[in-house]
Image: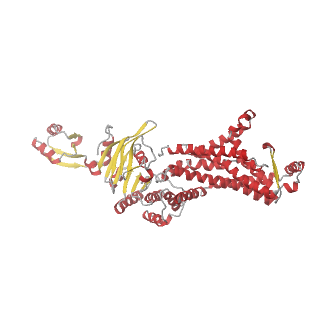
Amino acid sequence: MRLFFLQFQGEMWKLFARKRTYLGFGVFLALELVILLIIQLPKVQRAWRHVMENAGYGFEEYFSGITLAFQVVYLSTALLGGLYAALVAGDIVAKEVEDGTLRMALCRPISRLRLLAVKFLVCVFYTFALTFFIGLSALAVGIARQGIGGFFVFQPMDKLFAVYQFGPGLVRYLGSLFPLALSVLSVTSLAFMLSCCNVKPAAATISTLSYFIADMIFRRIPYFEPITQWFITTHTESWYNALRSPLPWQTMAEDYTYLLALDATFVLVGAVIFSSRDFKS
Amino acid sequence: MLELRDLQKAFGGRPALHGLSLEVRAGEIFGLLGHNGAGKSTSLGVLLGQVFPDKGEAFIDGVSVQRERARALARTGAIFEAPRFYDYLSGWRNLQIYTSYSARVPKEKIAEAVETVGLTERIHDRVGTYSQGMRQRLGLAQALLPENNLLLLDEPTNGLDPEGIHEMRTLIQRLNRERGITVLFCSHLLVEVEQLCDHVVILNQGYKVFDGPWAKLAVEECRVRLDLDDWEKAAVILRAMPDVTLSEGGFVAMKNGTDTADLVATLVHGGVRVRAVEPQRRNLEEIYLSITHREISPPVAS
């Protein structure tokens, strides 16, 4: 176990010594600031005031840091979603194969499965770290700009509406970050599986993103409404169910069981491919 | 110490190894010689469990690499043509990462290996700033850790300048002499193999075409230049000798085992006056090329 920890530590050194690891953090921070600036525009604020007051809630109380933070997370993950998770996971095996460092590692008595397990664990860590960074930085920036207040959850496209006082709202908001990370993990797992194949790192990342974008587009086409459960993004978007009142436990449990099974399948297929490959210059 | 038993491997239907068998004894520096594509790297890949053979098995210390890879490679280190490192990390971090795939290695052990290869001063610099020679030395340091007694070296002097080549060769010889480390040295450079190896196997298109001590290869066929008074008469006598071949310019090639004294006696006995006999040592390239350009036949026995 101590050796496994050492190997994990080594993977972490590699992960955090590379600039591309920080790219996601930097870009999301910049995106959050841009979204916040847009939300601050008088025209946008008027629209918010209209919605809140029509629903019977005071704009001054509910147009708060936490309300903005949710909007920022919702929009930024929808826009950039798993891009950075796919970038890291798509790179983690394929790039090392390309660079020849994986062949050096495989001169050692470590088993291929163990090496993959360490690498996947690092991807999981990165996915959670990035997601919590997005959520917490959005909250910090939101509160710094707009202060503490009630939590007004409103997204008409997803028929999402809920209102909380700051305390319970904060619990809901922070609680939603965990399922959000699990949703992003599906992107990570697919990119990881493709990274285990004999492909260039960029191909693994691009193929993953293409799949998820296509999945999202198809799911929104009305003809596919009856088979919406077949699309992965139907389940990955379940994270904001954590903000509904009452909490739809069963739906969330079903969605995340589906996603975790899918993740396990991706990782397993990747492991089988990786274990049966010849590595030769 | 190390054994390859009837290895066969094809990539996409193209055969890379044809029933290769060889044995390396403990404490030996063993050369694996061949052109590019002869099967050297594939053999090494099979030995490290990176390439799955279609048939046959590799053993290290009697343990099958294919069945118990972790146990077989527990004390084996390897480097390839150009050892690959994480350029964005220091040499020290690289060693920590690579050794963590084998065992928990104390810092003192790593420092000792670094000192052995003469890299102490630059070990905390980023590998991206290293020269090719320093990378090779770092590669050797990682191959020595944690406490390996078998080194598999695939073209370890690739890209080095003459001074670097000399340093690397001296280092390998010192490790073999002082620590008793067994070395399997793959190269296509004859001079290197000649200067380092006790025993050599030559591969050609996946076939083993020579297996034996280097000295045996060098004397397998010896040549002499004769100065005679009657070449016509001599040619008749020489053609009658089974292990002797006459070639232009007064050169006579003799198969291993034929004594020059017997040759001279036969000529004198046949009435030919021998004015001078000058032994000719064929250069290595000639020997190597004559072996690798022979018609490919099933593997030879040791």
| Residue at the limit of the structure toward the top, as seen here | A223
Would residue B30 be visible to someone looking at this image? yes
Residue B29 as seen in the image, left or right of residue B224: right
Nearest the camera: A254 or B220?
A254
| Residue at the limit of the structure toward the front, as seen here | A250
Q: Position of residue A236 (x, y in %)?
A: 69, 45
Residue B238 position by quadrant: top left
Q: Position of residue B156 (x, y in %)?
A: 42, 54
Residue A14 as seen in the image, left or right of residue B231: right
Q: How many marks?
A: 0
Would residue B80 be visible to someone looking at this image? no
Residue at the (79%, 55%) spot, across then down: A169
Q: Position of residue B20 (x, y in %)?
A: 36, 43
**In this figure, which colouring scheme has been used for the structure?**
secondary structure
Nearest the camera: B287 or B197?
B197
Q: Position of residue B213 (x, y in %)?
A: 29, 50
Residue B210 as seen in the image, left or right of residue B110: left
